[in-house]
Amino acid sequence: MTYCLGMLLEAGLVLMADTRTNAGVDNFSTFRKLHVLADQPDRRIYAATAGSLSLSQSTISLLQEQDLAGEEGRCLAKAATMFRVAQLVGEAVEQVGSTTGAALAREHIDNSLELLVGGFVGEGPPRLYLIYTIGNFIECTAEVPFLQIGETKYGRPILDRALTYRTPLPEAVKIGFLSFDSTMESNLGVANPIDVLVLPSDRKRGPLMRRIEEDDDYFREITHSWGTMLNEGVAKLPEPPWLTSKGP
């Protein structure tokens, strides 16, 4: 299983993706799921993938080949806006899905694929999109400043409670790590290493990419502290008045 998280904030963009893939309960591997699609002064575009590994790799390779060909209107390097980037990625997903994806479906093999695509083009602000299996997509908004793909349910509650559009980047990274920790506690198919991208809205500050290994001291510290604070907080909550020794 996979978990990927994108947070679009006033201060910038944060993308996180785990690296575990599995083909059965006893066949786990590590593959990068956070990809750099463009890294130029006028555009920085990134994608996180969830679903079929073969389809995600085919889609990323197709986008890279289109860029190498340089065909006008068909490559990310010449896209005028992030909306056009999302369209091109969606078209690549649809193309791969109609060929390899259709073949997998005939053999009753998982052919799902979703991507988080974020970044900026030109002078435009950072944007974040979720591309679905058939190539359609939605855009992240300030009202709900995050998008998830993969194993999403365990890591969502803390995002709903703690994350807002005005959350500073360092705090957003902490919230993102706790979202991943909740997911890893409940699903063995999600695990470190976690790839992290932080892209500030301030163009004077470049992007930061980091891989969080299983023995990362900071990740261990905040997840352990969070678990301790949860236990202590629960202990301090009042007991149900109808479930005390003085009750019936």
Image (cartoon, grey):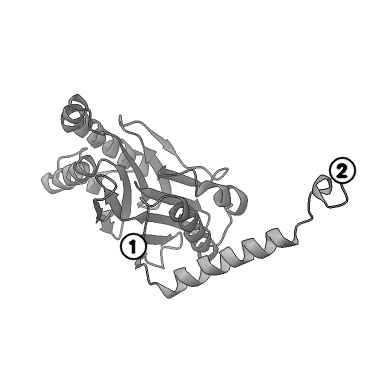
Which residue bears the numbered disc 2? 248
Task: Name the residue rendered at 26%, 56% in the picture.
Answer: 32
Asked where in the image residue 207 lies, by quadrant, the reply is bottom left
Task: Name the residue rendered at 55%, 50% in the picture.
Answer: 159
Residue 30 located left or right of residue 151: left
Q: Where is residue 120 in the image (x, y as percent from the top left)?
A: 37, 51
Residue 106, above or below 215: above
**Callouts 1 and 2 close, C-beta under 8 Å:** no
Residue 175 located left or right of residue 246: left
Q: For the C terminus, which image quadrant?
A: top right
Q: Position of residue 158 (x, y in %)?
A: 57, 52
Q: Nearer the viewer, mark 1 or mark 2?
A: 2
Query: The residue under label 1 is which amino acid type?
Result: Pro
Who is closer to the viewer here, 33 or 2?
2
Q: Position of residue 76 (x, y in %)?
A: 24, 45
Q: Which residue lies furthest to the bottom in this view?
A: 217
Query: The residue under label 2 is which amino acid type?
Result: Pro
Q: Can residue 125 be seen here?
A: no
Q: Distance between the residues labelled 1 and 2?
A: 52 Å
**Dot 2: what SS?**
loop
Q: Where is residue 220 in the image (x, y as percent from the top left)?
A: 46, 70
Q: Can residue 152 be seen here?
A: yes
Task: Name the residue rendered at 82%, 51% in the picture.
Answer: 244
Q: Which mark is residue 193?
A: 1
Residue 140 located left or right of residue 243: left
Who is closer to the viewer here, 241 or 194?
241
| Count of picture labels | 2
How many C-alpha atoms fall within 10 Å of the one at disc 2: few (<14), some, or many (≥20)?
Answer: few
> Upstream in the sequence, badge 1 or badge 2?
1
Q: Residue furthest top?
A: 106
